[in-house]
Image (cartoon, grey):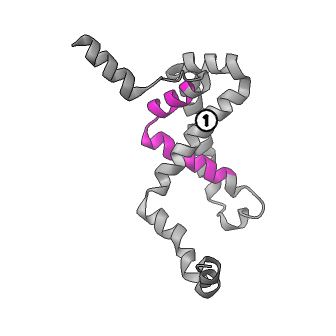
Amino acid sequence: MFRFTLALLLLCCGPVAAQTNTQQLSQCLADTTSGKDRKDLARWVFFGMASHPEIKQFTTPSAAGAEAETNKTIADLFTRLLAESCMRQAQAAFKEGGAKAIEIAFQTLGQLAMQELMTNPDVNASMASFEKSLDQNKLSKVFAAN
């Protein structure tokens, strides 16, 4: 019976690829952050993007206080994740790939945060609203069967 179970496991699952230290850090970051943490991260990204000269005109002066508070929240989050929750994984990833490994792991967390925001119906509706202005005649020519 044991051999049958072992054989079944080997057949169905195949070889398990070892995760790199950066992947392990990415997984730790995902596992130890809450939905609130990821929303805070998305808010921080938003403020960063809003500082671009071509976007800044769409922000309000009152956002400066919220941006400062968000920066403090993110500093606390990064510190907690790297120095407490995922310290072992962060050390291993840094040893393996330097600062770039840490950057990649946090990019993965950022993508997760954005995915969570994009599942909100209000966000989806806003992102899809451009479709009302599409020139359907021109687009139908592009996708017409040849």
Q: Is residue 97 visible?
A: yes
For image coordinates 58% across by 43% down, the residue present is: 110
Q: Is residue 108 magenta?
A: no
Residue 115: image x %, image y %?
A: 50, 50
For image coordinates 65% across by 63% down, the residue present is: 59
In the picture, measured across the screen, residue 31 lies left or right of residue 106, that is left
For image coordinates 65% across by 85% down, the residue present is: 138
Whether residue 33 is situated above or below residue 135 in the rendered picture: above
Question: What is the span of residues highlighted in magenta in the rendered image?
Answer: 24-48
Residue designated by label 1: 106
Q: Nearer the viewer, residue 34 or 57?
A: 34
Whether residue 56 is situated above or below residue 106 in the rendered picture: below
Residue 86: image x %, image y %?
A: 53, 22
Q: Does the magenta stretch include residue 46?
A: yes
Q: What element carries label 1?
A: helix
Residue 9: image x %, image y %?
A: 34, 22
In the picture, measured across the screen, residue 108 lies left or right of residue 33, that is right
Farthest-out residue, left: 1
Whether residue 139 is situated above or below residue 113 in the rendered picture: below
Kindly indicate the quadrant of the structure image that contains residue 58: bottom right
Kindly indicate the quadrant of the structure image that contains residue 53: bottom right
Farthest-out residue, bottom: 137
